């Protein structure tokens, strides 16, 4: 297996962990993956369910634009929610 990972950010969030990875393609371009990993239980065994999305260079600007638009909208819908309450310093 070829490890094409160039950079990783890891975000722990309770039973979930998010990974934001920059990976290199064979064509020397890069792409972004966002992975959610959730702990689950199958009987006595701990397991992990993973969901992954890929964002390619041609989509990155639109993705960031609409992600920021959606985050801003969510915050406007929840004006009394403290979005910083789980930030670690």
Image (tube, grey):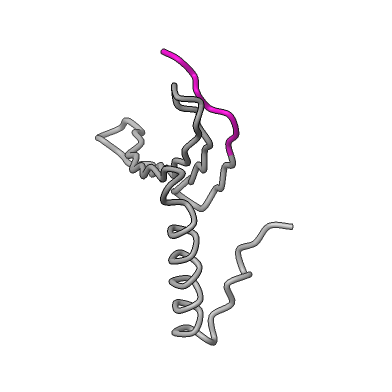
Residue at 50%, 23% in the rendered image: 4
- Across and down, in percent, residue 7 comes to 60, 34
- Magenta highlight on residue 5: yes
- Across and down, in percent, residue 49 comes to 32, 39
Residue stretch in magenta: 1-8
- Magenta highlight on residue 69: no
Specify the quadrant of the image occupied by residue 53.
Answer: top left
Q: Nearer the viewer, residue 73 or 12?
A: 73
Specify the quadrant of the image occupied by residue 82.
Answer: bottom right
The image quadrant where one finds the C terminus is bottom right
Q: Give the mark count.
A: 0
Task: Indicate left or right for 46 with 57 as reference.
Answer: left
Q: Relative to 49, is 45 above or below?
A: above
Residue found at the very far left of the displayed protein: 43
Task: Indicate left or right for 8 with 47 as reference.
Answer: right
Q: Relative to 58, is 75 above or below?
A: below
- Across and down, in percent, residue 64 comes to 49, 59
Residue at 54%, 86% in the rendered image: 80
Q: Nearer the viewer, residue 82 or 24?
A: 24
């Amino acid at each position: 297996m070829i490890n094409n990972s160039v950079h990783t950010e890891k975000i722990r969030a309770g039973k979930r962990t998010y990974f934001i990875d920059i990976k290199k393609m064979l064509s020397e371009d890069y792409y972004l993956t966002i992975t959610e990993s959730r702990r689950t239980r199958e009987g006595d065994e701990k397991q992990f369910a993973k969901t992954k999305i890929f964002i390619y260079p041609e989509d990155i600007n639109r993705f960031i634009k609409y992600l920021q638009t959606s985050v801003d909208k969510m915050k406007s819908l929840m004006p009394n929610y403290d979005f910083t309450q789980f930030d670690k310093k």
